[in-house]
Amino acid sequence: MLWLFTIPAVFYASILLYISGYLKKIAPFTAAGASDLPSVSVVIACRNEEKNIPGLLNALAAQNYPRHLFEVIIVDDNSSDATPVLAGEFKGILNLKVIRNSGRGKKAALSCGVGSASFPLVVTTDADCRMSPAWLSAIAGFFRVEKPEMIICPVNLAAPPRLTGAFQQIEWAALQGITAGTAVAGNPVMCNGAGLAFTRDAYMRHSGNMQSHLASGDDVFFLHSLKRENKGKILWLPSQEAAVTTPAASSLRSLVGQRARWVSKSGGYRDPFTIMLAIVTFVTNMSLPFLFAAAVPGNAFSFLPLAAAFAVKTSADFYFLKQSFSSLRLPEPVNFAGLFFLSEILYPIYIIIVLLKSIGRSGRW
């Protein structure tokens, strides 16, 4: 009977191999110079970001994109610090607007910002992100060539050189691999608002489907709504020039809190492939501690189903992660093999803790 609990691991491994096949197909995009570049509105929703907003604005001011072809819209979500003052005093960007959120929360702030955008192509990021001077050029060049309604951009992680940082690097490579691979397969399940571009028209068509009762998920709910429309193209942008870098969680506690906030929105998912992938991943991870608990009272042969399920899952994870690091050009943590094996053992416990912490967090940003 215990062998039945190895079946989820087989499904899980099959999905990862499927996605890995599409990761292999990724070829880097290089934007060529052109005279008909689109105008771009960069929208940043922020709250209490006085420590981060100057660095972000300096990075945006350093863009090599023509200054008259982009605007930056800072939407202050009821900050209690100097965020709006610092943004309003910044002089390095030709077209800079600082507006106040007409509602409350990130979704309302983004809606306010996109509604104020002057241009048809909108790019979003976060206040704590940083980007290269070629960031807007890469995104706009890709949009000019492909004409998608949504562009999913790479988001890199700046992780501290310690165990929690290495664990986040491994988890992040998995998340980025799922994001890129499913998008290339034409069946995207995830995106990250820290590096996202879309047409203003597409956003306006789908702004009513953002699950406003949930504090987070503005990016993924938009993606899923646009995907259901089965009309506009949703594409992955395979260029590190289009990447932003976001800081890793500073501690295990903040990491669990952040992931719990992400999980809290999953109850609003309606995309079948996303739901199936989440269920298979959860059941596979939960089957391992169950098989271990069931095997302890028995003899050595009782551990065979556990060993089989663990071997199948671990092999699939390792292959998928190596493909993600390679295809997406992400740096591997030092001593990756050992850290990977340790994370495979601890991950089911981590999932349980995150799931418990996610209860009751749906209303908080």
Image (cartoon, helix red, strand yellow):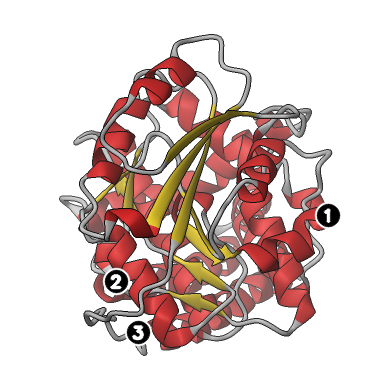
In screen coordinates, is 337 left or right of 118? Answer: left
Residue 276 makes an appearance in the image: no
Residue 208 horizontal/vertical position (percent)? 83, 54
When the figure is inspected, residue 32 is found, relative to residue 78, above or below; the finding is below
Residue at mark 2 to residue at mark 1: CA–CA distance: 31 Å
In screen coordinates, is 140 left or right of 186? Answer: left
Marker count (numbered): 3
Q: Quadrant of the N terminus?
A: bottom right
Q: Quadrant of the C terminus?
A: top right
Relative depth, front residue between 289 and 114: 114
Q: Which residue is mark 1?
A: 208
Viewer-side label of 2, 3:
2
Q: Which residue is mark 3?
A: 26
Element type where label 2 sits in the image: loop
Residue 64 horizontal/vertical position (percent)? 20, 58
Relative depth, front residue between 17 and 130: 130
Residue at image coords 45%, 40%: 126
Residue 323 makes an appearance in the image: yes
Residue at image coords 29%, 59%: 135
When the figure is inspected, residue 80 is found, relative to residue 354, above or below; the finding is above
Relative depth, front residue between 98 and 246: 98
2 or 3: tag closer to the N-terminus: 3
Residue at image coords 23%, 61%: 134
Element type where label 1 sits in the image: helix
In screen coordinates, is 23 left or right of 19? Answer: left
